[in-house]
Structure formats: structure tokens, C-alpha cells
């Protein structure tokens, strides 16, 4: 089963090209047009020829205002930035901020997220990726950017490149005609890169007495999280096609252009 292709960037974590992922029939995602990654706060185009060669024209930032302020993107020259805050959280009080804070404080982590509550909170976030108004608006912006004719390569990212970005990639692939097993394989494929990025943070957390299960729930890439989002789509709209039209407000023309651009 073909997953996205790793791009050997030296300054951007978890950078992958969705090109090559298998679709229904004999189709595949066209390479060089849809990229996913972690944050761009360390991007150095001059020191990173692999990234520079991608020719990114649009960057879609799925993070909260707080995350953007703490680690602003370093934009590649000539690229357009599209802010699409999935979990609109200007006060920094949402689940994403709480989970991040908990990994810096084992006692807080246990109080708020012990006894399986971290995994429960993560699954709730994934349902919010589907149902929250800010999320639906954000993913509409992402899909519209990818559907833009002659828009050039698009890179979308959050902080780790696994949750908000993972659901974005799942939506793209489902609308292009990938089956659920392919989408799940693609979702899980980033696990090793994410764990590597957060090795130091997790080690410090557990060394200070933090529960490894809490850290794993936050940093891990779990099929149950993706299933929570897929179930939210099924519960609210029936299938991803109906969700794209009624939930995200995408026009048939936009979905058609998305497929024309990205299906080879």
C-alpha cells in the first residue's frame, strides 16, 4: 500500500508529499502539489535545498493564534500564507493548549488527563475537527487552495503535522477516491517522525514522574482518533461527499477542480 513520500528536509519536520497515494481504479495522487508537515518555525530555505526545490506557492497554517505567536512560520520566498485556525483558540484555553501545557507539568497532566482522559480529550478534538465551525471553515479554505487552478504546490501544517494536518490529509484523500484502509495507512505513517520530533519533551516529562500513557496519548498517532473523526462525519452527514458539500460548503465545481488538479 503506497503512502505519502518523505521529503528529506533538514529544517522542516515530518514533511511529506501526498503524491503517489493510491486512489480508486488505477489513479494516484499527482506528485509535487500537495504537501503536509510539522511547523515551519525552523525553515531555512538557503540551508535546505530539498525544501527549496518544492516551489511551495501557498502555506496553509492550521494552528491556533497562540501557537502562531510562539512559533511563527518562516515563509518560503514568494509563497502566500493562509491562516486557517482549526480550533480557533485566541485565549489559548482549548484542548490543544491544555495538552501542551500538561506535558510540561506532570502533576497538572495527572490531574487533568490521567486515567485515560488524555486519549478521550484527543478523540474529542478529532470530532471537533469535523463539527466545529472554525474547523469547517479552515478545511474549506485548505481544500479550496488545493483546488485552485494553476495555484502551484500547497503545503499545509499544524505543529506536529499529525492531528489537524492528519485529518486534513484524510479529507483530501477521501475526496480524491482513496479507500479507508489507504487513508488509515497514510494517517499512521507519520508516527515515527512525530515521536522523533518530541523525544526530548517526552523524556523530560517521564523523567519528572509523568505518566508515559499520557505522553503516548498526546504524541502517538492512534487509529481510534481517526475513527472518531470518521464517525463524526458519518453521524452528521453520512459520507465524506455529503460532508464536503453540506458541512464544508464546497461547490461541485471546487470538488471537480480538486480532482482535476490532484488525480493522475
Image (cartoon, rainbow, N blue to C red):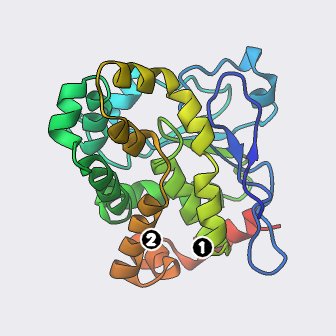
| Residue 91 at least partly seen | no
Residue 245 in the image: state x and y as whole percent.
47, 77
Dot 2 corresponds to which residue?
A: 230
In front here: 145 or 224? 224
Q: Residue at x 36, y 25 (%)?
A: 206
| Residue 152 at least partly seen | yes
* Horizontal side, residue 228 vs residue 183: left or right: left
Seen as rendered, the residue at the extreme bottom is: 238
* Horizontal side, residue 167 vs residue 25: left or right: left
Where disc 2 sits, the SS reads helix
Dot 1 corresponds to which residue?
A: 180
**Picture layout, residue 213 above or below residue 126:** above
Q: Which residue is drawn at 64% across and 57% down?
A: 186
Residue 47 in the image: state x and y as whole percent.
75, 14
Q: In which quarter of the image is the C terminus?
A: bottom right
Residue 232 in the image: state x and y as whole percent.
36, 72
* Horizontal side, residue 112 vs residue 179: left or right: left
Q: In which quarter of the image is residue 127?
A: bottom left
Q: Quadrant of residue 253?
A: bottom right
Seen as rendered, the residue at the extreme top is: 47
Question: If you read the primary sequence from the N terminus, does the residue marked by circle 1 or circle 2 appear first?
Answer: 1
Residue 213 in the image: state x and y as whole percent.
35, 41
Q: Do the residues labelled 1 and 2 touch (CB within 8 Å)?
A: yes
Where disc 1 sits, the SS reads helix
In front here: 144 or 71? 71
Q: Residue at x 59, y 54 (%)?
A: 188
* Neighbour tally class for label 1: few under 14, some 14-19, many 20 plus, Cα within 10 Å: some
**Picture layout, residue 253 above or below residue 61:** below
Q: What separation in Å lies between label 1 and label 2 (alpha carbons)?
A: 9 Å
**Picture layout, residue 96 above or below residue 181:** above
In front here: 217 or 7? 217
Amino acid at each position: 500500500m503506497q503512502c505519502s513520500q518523505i521529503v528529506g528536509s533538514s529544517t522542516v519536520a515530518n514533511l511529506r508529499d501526498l503524491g503517489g497515494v493510491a486512489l480508486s481504479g488505477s489513479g494516484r495522487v499527482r506528485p509535487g502539489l500537495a504537501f503536509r508537515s510539522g511547523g515551519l518555525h525552523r525553515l531555512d530555505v538557503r540551508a535546505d535545498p530539498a525544501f527549496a526545490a518544492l516551489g511551495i506557492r501557498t502555506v496553509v497554517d492550521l494552528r491556533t493564534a497562540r501557537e502562531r505567536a510562539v512559533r511563527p512560520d518562516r515563509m518560503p520566498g514568494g509563497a502566500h500564507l493562509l491562516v486557517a485556525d482549526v480550533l480557533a483558540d485566541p485565549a489559548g484555553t482549548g484542548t490543544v493548549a491544555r495538552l501542551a501545557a500538561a506535558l510540561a507539568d506532570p502533576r497538572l497532566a495527572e490531574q487533568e488527563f490521567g486515567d485515560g482522559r488524555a486519549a478521550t480529550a484527543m478523540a474529542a478534538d478529532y470530532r471537533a475537527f469535523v463539527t466545529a465551525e472554525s474547523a469547517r471553515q479552515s478545511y474549506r479554505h485548505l481544500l479550496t487552495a488545493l483546488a485552485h487552478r494553476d495555484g502551484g504546490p500547497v503545503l499545509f501544517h499544524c505543529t506536529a503535522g499529525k492531528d489537524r494536518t492528519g485529518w486534513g490529509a484524510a479529507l483530501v484523500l477521501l475526496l480524491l477516491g482513496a479507500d479507508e484502509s489507504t487513508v488509515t495507512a497514510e494517517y499512521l505513517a507519520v508516527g515515527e517522525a512525530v515521536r522523533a520530533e518530541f523525544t526530548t519533551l517526552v523524556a523530560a516529562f517521564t523523567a519528572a514522574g509523568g505518566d508515559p500513557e499520557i505522553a503516548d496519548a498526546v504524541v502517538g498517532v492512534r487509529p481510534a482518533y481517526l475513527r472518531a473523526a470518521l464517525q463524526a462525519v458519518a453521524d452528521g452527514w453520512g459520507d465524506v461527499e455529503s460532508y464536503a458539500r453540506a458541512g464544508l460548503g464546497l461547490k461541485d465545481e471546487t470538488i471537480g477542480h480538486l480532482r482535476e488538479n490532484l488525480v493522475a
